[in-house]
Image (tube, rainbow, N blue to C red):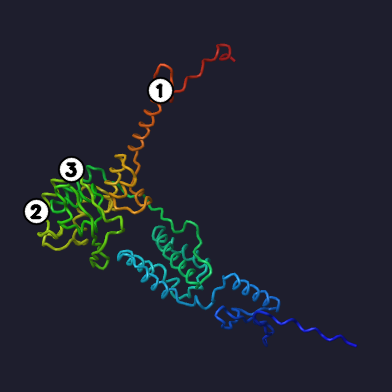
Amino acid sequence: MARPRKRAPRRSFGAIRKLPSGRYQARYPGTDGVLRAAPETYETKSDAEVFLSQVQADQTRGDWIDPTAGEVLFAEYATRWIGERGVAPTTDELYRRLLRLHLEPTFGGLHVNRISPARVRTWRAERLRATGSTTTAKAYRLLKAIMETAVEDDMIRKNPCRIRGAGREEADERPVASVAQVFDLAEAIGLRWRLMVLLGAFASMRPEELAELRRGDVDLDAGSVRVRRAAPELNTGRRVIGDPKSRAGKREIVLPAFVHADVRRHLEWFAELGPDGLVFVGERGAALRGTTFGRKWRRARDKVGLPEEFRFYDLRHTGNTLAADTGAKLKDLMVRAGQSSEKAQLIYQHSTKEHQRRLAADIDVDVRRQRAAATPGGATVHPFIPRPPAAAPPAARRR
């Protein structure tokens, strides 16, 4: 008598069926109860069973991602991402420009879940050839931040931006003007804008902070200015009045005494009238505009002989380096420059050959002092001059 044929045990998760083509299709319920088909069919039933086991394990661990959640166009998701950040207008403008020029041409028409590490690597290599490392690093950081939010939104499992160091900028160190060059610039640019150059250098003020400086922010008795607002100018020419670049940007800056006379003269001759009047205005009394001031700045810069890449913003490097050379604590330097992070402040602490010579001289003096203190009788010691080797005997020299 033939044995009854054993039936295969019924699956506890998902289902598998054989298609007319001979391949196998796996279907499974998502955590929302909706039945879904696997993204591909399988050559054998065992392969389909392995897929279902993996999906079941992911759901048990809480790692399962709805494969349809990431079916959103990157351009749409990225635009929404920027709008939800609540960043400063200048940062918003930068993000949208990077998205439009560098990300959308490659990723804009792709679904978020179709952006793979291989696509990111290929895109970065193309951008490096086309635009250079600095802009590519900025665009990569933006892409990585957007995709990290997609991970948090359960649209994808892992961030495809995995290139180590790709978001790090290694731009050349900015040029630094000497004190003499700063005063030459102040003379070359003319009386109306002289104070602006001096405050940009010796008070470490940003151009957008100077553009919104008001009479009421200047305390002549205390010899200080308060930074409360900023008015950056976008590429469209629109002035956006608001808070400074960061929370640390709101600060009071005590001015060096040699600037006081320039401040008084400027307020008497050029500043807008009234306690809330702008300190810096154009010849016709209008608010400071980058295009107008830019022409005057370039002429003065060229006259002094500074390099073409020297920007008004680079005046901060002079002031911050001078402040660091006084031996001030890092926190004091950060407060004066309106920096919210140590990393940002360290950008402005330049080390020149003169600084290195001064440092070496200080080390030399200190080492000599300590060696002398440790020597009986306090005799002077020259630790860096080695003794000459003893002369070889004549017989040895002959051999």
| Mark 2 touches mark 1? (CB < 8 Å) | no
Answer few, some or many: residues within 10 Å of disc 2's Cα (few below 14, many 20 plus, some between 14 and 19): few
- Identify the residue at horizontal 43%, vertical 24% (top origin): 383
Looking at the image, which is closer to me, 33 or 366?
A: 33
With respect to residue 238, does 313 lie above or below? Answer: above
* 301 left or right, relative to 173: left
With respect to residue 116, does 180 lie above or below? Answer: above
Q: CA distance from mark 2 to mark 1?
A: 60 Å
Circle nearer the N terminus (1, 3): 3
Q: CA distance from mark 1 to mark 3?
A: 41 Å
Circle nearer the N terminus (3, 2): 3
- Identify the residue at horizontal 14%, vertical 49% (top origin): 220
Q: Residue furthest right?
A: 1
Answer few, some or many: residues within 10 Å of disc 1's Cα (few below 14, many 20 plus, some between 14 and 19): some
Q: Secondary structure at mark 3?
A: helix
Looking at the image, which is closer to me, 54 or 70?
A: 54
Amino acid tagged 2: Trp
Q: Disc 2 designates what residue?
A: 269
Q: How many marks?
A: 3
With respect to residue 54, does 398 lie above or below? Answer: above
Q: Disc 1 designates what residue?
A: 373
Q: Disc 3 designates what residue?
A: 257
Circle nearer the N terminus (2, 1): 2
Answer few, some or many: residues within 10 Å of disc 3's Cα (few below 14, many 20 plus, some between 14 and 19): few
Q: Secondary structure at mark 2?
A: helix
Q: Position of residue 51 (x, y in %)?
A: 64, 75
Name the mark nearer the viewer: 3 or 2: 3
Q: Secondary structure at mark 1?
A: helix
Amino acid tagged 1: Ala
Quarter where residue 277 is shown = bottom left
* 396 left or right, relative to 256: right
